Amino acid sequence: MKKIIIDTDMGADDYIAVQLAILSNKFKIEGITLVNGNTSMENAKRNIFKTLDMINKLGCVKVYEGSKNPIKDFMINTKDNAHGNNGFSDVIYPKVNGQVEKTNAVDWMIKKVNDSPNKISIVAIGPLSNIATAIQKDKDFEKNIKEIIIMGGAKKSGNITPYAEFNFYNDPEAAKLVFESKIKNKIMIGFDVTKKVTFFSELENLFKYSYEKNAKFIYDITRDSAKLDREKNKVDGAVISDAINICYLINKRVLKLKRCNVKIETNKIEYLAQSVVSFEKEANCKIAVDVDSKKCLYVIFSTIIPKLKKSIKKILKCKKTN
Ligand code: RIB
Ligand code: CA
C-alpha cells in the first residue's frame, strides 16, 4: 500500500479528498497534518474530526496541528469565502470529540519522513506552510520525501487573482521554497485543470435530496463554492480540486502530466504567487495539463458514497471504468 501523509486546510473539497483516501483502501495514511488556509486552525480541527466521524473512521488516523500562519509575516486576508468562514459553507454541525496529537505537525512530519527515506508521498491540499517549515528546519527532509503531489497554482488563470491560485497565494514564500527545493518528484495539479471537474450539473439533485447522510452533507458544504464557481470561476461548480490529487494516486490515467519548470512569483505584487510555467527551461516538476473529468467523478463519488454507485454511474453515463 502506498504510504501517504495528507497535509490539508480542511475546506469542503478537502473533506471529499480525505474520505476518498480512507475509503479507497489504497493507502496507508501515516497521518493527517493541518495547516491554516481555507479556515482557522480551530475550524480545521473541527472539520477533520467531522470528516472522519461521518464515515465512522474517527480514530483511524492520527491528526497533527500545524502552521497557523504563512512562513513570512506577509499575511494577506485570503479568506475568499469559497468555503464560507468555517470551511464548510458555514454549515453548523455538532462538534465531534476528537483530539489532535501532542507533537506538532512539522516535527512529526520531519521524523516520519526521515525514518522512512523515499517511502512516503506527501499529498499537499492546502497552503504549503507546513512543508516549507519542515524543509527550513531539517536539512535531510526534502531529500527523503518520495514525492509530493500538490494541489495548487495554475498554468493560466487563478481563482484568487487573475494570476494566482488560493493555496499558493495564501503562502507565496512557502510555495517558492517548495518548488526550489530538492524534493525529487514534485507534481503540481493546478486550478486550470481541477476546475474542469465539477459535479453540480449532474449530481446536485441526487445529493441534495438523498437519504444518504454523507451525500446530503457534501451538497450542503459545497453549496457556497458552487455559487462562487458559477459567479467568479465561470464553471458550473462545485469544483473539488483536492479530490483530484487522491484520484490521481488511485488511477494515474485520470490525468495527463507534462514535465516543465515552475517558478513562483513573490516580488511583483500584481502577479504575487503566480506559478510561471515554462516547457523550455530546465524541468523541476511535472504539471497536470488535462483530466478525465467523468472518470474522476465516478471514482470519487462511487467510492465515498457506495450506496449511490448505481445512480451515479447511470447519471454520469460512465464508460466502463476500471
Ligand atoms: O484553490 C483551491 C484550493 O484552495 C483547494 O485546496 C481548496 O481546498 C482551497 O484550499
Ligand atoms: Ca484545500
Image (spheres, rainbow, N blue to C red):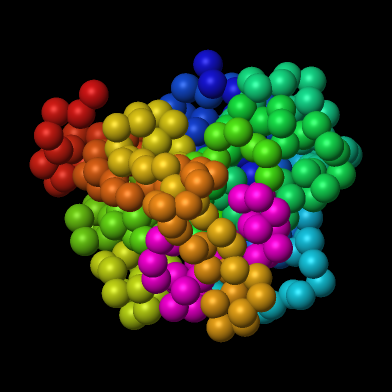
Q: Residue furthest bottom?
A: 270
In the image, 149 versus 265, the foreground residue is 265
Q: What is the x, y in percent for residue 69?
A: 78, 64
**Residue drawn 79% across the image and 50% down it:** 133
**Magenta span:** 154-180
Q: What is the x, y in percent for residue 227?
A: 36, 74
For residue 99: magenta?
Answer: no
In the picture, measured across the screen, residue 120 lies left or right of residue 295, that is right
Q: Which quadrant would residue 43 be assigned to in this image?
A: bottom right
**Residue drawn 71% across the image and 27% down it:** 144
Number of marks = 0
In the image, 285 versus 316, the foreground residue is 285
**Residue drawn 78% across the image and 44% down it:** 135
In the picture, measured across the screen, residue 111 lies left or right of residue 295, that is right
| Residue 142 at least partly seen | yes
Q: Is residue 120 above or below residue 187?
A: above
Q: What is the x, y in percent for residue 59?
A: 68, 31
In the image, 21 versus 1, the foreground residue is 1
Q: What is the x, y in percent for residue 181?
A: 68, 45
In the picture, measured across the screen, residue 108 lies left or right of residue 122, that is right
Q: Which quadrant would residue 233 be assigned to in this image?
A: bottom left
Q: Is residue 23 above or below residue 244?
A: above
Say which quadrant the C terminus sits in: top left
| Residue 95 at least partly seen | no
**Residue drawn 61% across the image and 50% down it:** 179
In the image, 247 versus 212, the foreground residue is 247
